[in-house]
Amino acid sequence: MTPEANLLHELPWRSADRAPQATALLDDDRAISYAALAEEMRAFAAALAALGLQRGERVGIYLDKRRETVVASFGAPAQGGVFVPINPLLKAEQVAYILRDCGVRVLVTSPERLRALQAVLPDCPSLAHVIVTGAPPATVAGPAVHAWAEVLQSPPAASHRVVDTDMVGILYTSGSTGKPKGVVLSHRNMVAGAKSVATYLENRSDDVLLAALPLSFDAGFSQLTTAFHAGASVVLLNYLLPRDVVKAVVAHRVTGMTAVPPLWIQLTQVKWPDVGVHFRYFANTGGRMPLDTLKSLRALLPSARPFLMYGLTEAFRATYLPPDQVDRRPDSIGKAIPNSEVLVLRPDGTPCDPGEPGELVQRGALVAQGYWNDPEKTAERFRPLPGREPGLVLPEIAVFSGDTVRRDEEGYLYFIGRRDEMIKSSGYRISPNEVEEVLYATQRVGECAAFGVPHATLGEAVIVVATARAGAAVDAAELLALCRERLPAYMVPAQIELREGPLPRNANGKIDRKAISTAFRDALQGVAP
């Protein structure tokens, strides 16, 4: 019997032992077996050893979704290194910040991306080596440059000793305000998360999962870890348009897909062919899915089971709503995932009563190791769990999410809003999600973002920026009238601004409410509505 994985790189290796010829990846329609993938991961680990990578040193990966991205992400930990996935949408200065912040020693990238980075690489003193997936540029100032194909010819080498509490990856948040924070994850975090998610999604070896989210996003990388745990296949998709996603689902007979609300919203506005029974589930994360979008998806994909999930990078995944509960409570984020506990606490650390809003706090094996090189922010978010038995001398560190939720009498959780995004108007605390939900239900809005701006008498006024739904004729006055019909007076927007095209997104594909709010406030030039 093949032993269970304890370390990140053991997830694909164990599947290679069980079924070496099974397809692990589909990259540009090329099928890559588990055996071939495991061999290439070991070769990459040997290449890092030849370059002198020491245990715990960081390996940056600045690529789109492709075979080399996956090989480097799992091969670096096999040598005792720490992988740092860098969102391919980031620009040179943003990439350089990450390289400097966590002291990346080796960078894996493409020739085109390397040329774009040449001006900033001299400002990254820890960077010693760059591995390029194609022909490297003639000259690069600073680090030594190596071709991928050549370094993978390095002779086998002994790997550094690794245990599951060692750090394995640093995932940088999108950084919509200030500089991005690097969330430090251990092998235990990632393996426990893979096993937990694969359990409730019932992933199995004949699954084909579509990786549509960035692999630098925890939910995106999860498509790899859960699939490798189950021995399933992953389709790597770098899509331009929503219809490209639909085409991939059909072409590869995808069985499951996880996405964020903006993508699901777009996917309800394109034509879907009959995908039959092979597409057996769709999952949402990264924000609350509007009820109207959920209804539309269930009509488009009647055989697919919906999984509504909630999570944060600092603890990977927190809750999910089982499909058999969606009709009863479609606005719930569910209960804690397997091998995790979610608490709802007051500011003094005591548990909230049913129906009482409080902060979501998560404990267990998925809680990360803090923020890289940022003790202040780590102390804010990662704190000792209150209410422990007095005989337990060492504290247990939990992650305090900053999100406000409530729990019903049956233990199901409901997301209210992020503490820093709640709108405070006329003495009321307003969740922007509640306002957005009403607008989506009108069937006239494609995307929207609600937020508060300073107001002399209200404290904050509710503002909405929205786009029109495809094919819908809409104006702001009509939307405001519908809001007055469906919302209490204190929640009715003071202004709805309609825009063309998609709303701004952060690097993980979520609608960037903070960026939209900041731009709107700047446009006001200090004049309150």
Image (spheres, helix red, strand yellow):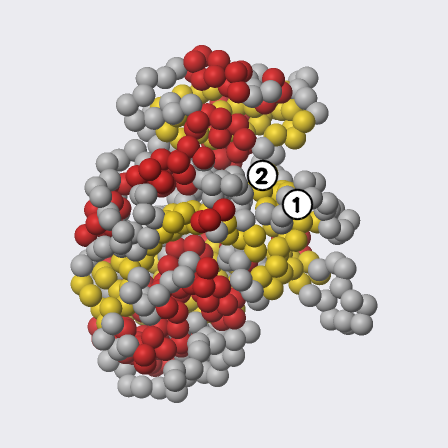
Rendered location of residue 263, percent (x, y): 36, 41
- Pick whichever, 325 or 248, lies toward us: 325
Q: Which residue does the numbered mark 1 point to in the structure image?
A: 409
Above or below, 259 against 204 in this view is: above
Q: Report how far apart the C-alphas of labels 1 and 2 lie in the structure.
A: 20 Å
Rendered location of residue 190, percent (x, y): 48, 66
Badge 1: residue crowd in 10 Å (few <14, some 14–19, many ≥20): few
Three-letter residue code for mark 1? Glu
Residue 217 occupies which quadrant of the picture? bottom left
Q: Which is in the foreground here, disc 1 or disc 2? A: 1
The quadrant of the rendering that contains the N terminus is: bottom left
Element class at badge 1: loop
Rendered location of residue 196, percent (x, y): 48, 64
Instruction: Please tell me which residue is depicted at 30% across the width and 39% down the height of the picture.
Output: 300
Instruction: Please tell me which residue is depicted at 57% across the width and 42% down the height of the picture.
Output: 415
Q: Earlier in the sequence, mark 1 or mark 2?
A: 1
Q: Which residue does the numbered mark 2 point to in the structure image?
A: 417
- Pick whichever, 387 or 515, lies toward us: 387
Instruction: Please tell me which residue is depicted at 23% across the width and 75% down the height of the picture.
Output: 21
Residues at discs 1 and 2 in contact (Cβ within 8 Å): no
Three-letter residue code for mark 2? Gly
Element class at badge 2: strand
